[in-house]
Image (cartoon, rainbow, N blue to C red):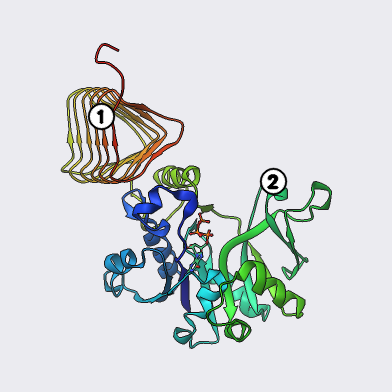
């Protein structure tokens, strides 16, 4: 089975981080998010993947090249302008030469049982099988209603509380019969979830929902992104890409005197933490970051190459690459510092 990964979006909800890296390439515990998805595919026997690209497409190709390093065959197809999730699939049609293929949104961290979904798709003789995940407040989402066998009966958009008949939403993974491509228009910008699926249902085609009960997270907002790091650190998601221990301190990291480190933490290569600082997990400190004296880093994610001054306090903060945070700076409340920024504290030295 070949897989298409949709990775052409601009990741607007994750700005300013996505001004630097496209959303599927943001680091989770030191590895690009996309590695977690590729490992999941490999575990389930997918060896050939077509990246459907647009925004910052070169970052993917520069990192993964032809895929030999991870034992996969990778193709890159770049759109001239965004085609939406349906147009983006149609755009890679030339690579899809089998009867069935699958599609991933490029921002879902999950442990989908792909083999089981493939089997259900075949057994139900489905045109499309959509992975679904439960939500707590169904009134906020587009919902998918199933019959007892898993056949999709209806799509409903943000229903009123009294009309709620399902708590399942589209989880961003599909198995598709190749014939669905015949219904798509090349070069048109439109959505598979809002247009292609409802139209197929109207035509009476067999659409099946697979209710996923395992781990699932859309990493597309700062809160979700930091949560993804916490969850991977705490082994809530089992992945070959995850750290193997809750305390990872690279062998060449330099840790000063009286530094306290509370797990779970991931501390990368060449990191330097100076005397008297406290690192409280879940926290990720990317390669070659420096933390000055007597600073606190708690529940935070630092991308590689950033420097944090002396007597700083960072609690629940995301810091992009190559930032410089001056002495005595206090940040919190899920602050997000875009890559290459310089932050200078306005506190006087006496404070
Ligand atoms: P936001 O701007 O924050 O909504 O993020 P996004 O547009 O990057 O992601 P969204 O959740 O809306 O889309 C789901 C997946 O489809 C993501 O992995 C996107 O990269 C991808 N995607 C969205 N639009 C396009 C597109 O026009 N072309 C391609 N190739 N992929 C797309």
| Left-right relation of 124 to 189 | right
Name the side, left or right, on which 242 lies relative to 192: left
Mark 1 vs mark 2, CA separation in Å: 41 Å
Name the mark on residue 346: none
Which element carries disc 1, helix, strand or loop? loop
- For label 2, the residue is 137
Q: Which quadrant is the C terminus positioned in? A: top left
Does residue 84 lie above or below 251 as drawn? Answer: below
Where residue 36 sits: x, y (%)? Answer: 40, 59
The reply, left or right, for residue 202 in relation to residue 129 is right
Task: Indicate yes or no: mark 1 CB to ligand 1 under 8 Å.
Answer: no
List x then y, in percent, for residue 315: 39, 30
The extreme right residue here reads: 162
Please tell me the numbered disc located at residue 326: 1
Residue 318 point in image, percent of width and height = 38, 40
Q: Are marks 1 and 2 in contact (CB under 8 Å)?
A: no
């Amino acid at each position: 089975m070949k897989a298409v990964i949709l990775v052409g979006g601009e990741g607007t909800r994750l700005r300013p981080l996505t001004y630097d890296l496209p959303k599927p390439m943001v680091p989770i515990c030191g590895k690009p998010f996309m590695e977690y998805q590729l490992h999941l595919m490999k575990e389930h026997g997918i060896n050939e993947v077509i990246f459907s690209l647009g925004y910052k497409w070169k970052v993917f190709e520069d990192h993964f090249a032809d895929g030999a390093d991870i034992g996969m065959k990778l193709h890159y197809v770049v759109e001239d302008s965004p085609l939406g999730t349906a147009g983006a699939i149609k755009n890679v049609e030339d690579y899809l030469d089998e009867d069935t293929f699958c599609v991933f949104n490029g921002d879902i961290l999950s442990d989908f049982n792909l083999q089981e979904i493939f089997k259900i798709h075949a057994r139900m003789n489905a045109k499309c099988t959509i992975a679904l995940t439960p939500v707590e407040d169904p009134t906020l989402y587009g919902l998918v209603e199933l019959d007892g066998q898993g056949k999709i009966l209806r799509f409903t958009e943000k229903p009123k509380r009294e009309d709620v008949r399902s708590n399942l939403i589209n989880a961003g993974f599909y198995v598709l019969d190749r014939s669905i491509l015949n219904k798509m228009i090349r070069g048109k910008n439109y959505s598979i979830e809002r247009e292609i699926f409802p139209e197929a249902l109207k035509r009476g085609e067999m659409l099946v929902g697979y209710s996923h009960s395992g781990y699932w997270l859309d990493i597309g907002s700062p809160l979700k992104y930091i949560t993804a790091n916490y969850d991977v650190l705490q082994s809530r998601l089992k992945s070959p890409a995850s750290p193997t221990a809750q305390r990872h301190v690279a062998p060449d990291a330099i840790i000063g005197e009286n530094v306290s480190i509370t797990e779970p933490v991931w501390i990368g290569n060449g990191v330097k933490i100076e005397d008297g600082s406290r690192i409280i997990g879940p926290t990720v400190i990317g390669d070659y970051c420096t933390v000055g004296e007597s600073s606190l880093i708690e529940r935070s994610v630092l991308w590689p190459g950033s420097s944090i001054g002396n007597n700083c306090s960072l609690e629940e903060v995301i810091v992009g690459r190559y930032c410089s945070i001056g002495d005595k700076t206090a940040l919190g409340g899920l602050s997000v510092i875009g890559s290459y920024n310089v932050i200078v504290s306005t506190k006087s030295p006496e404070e």
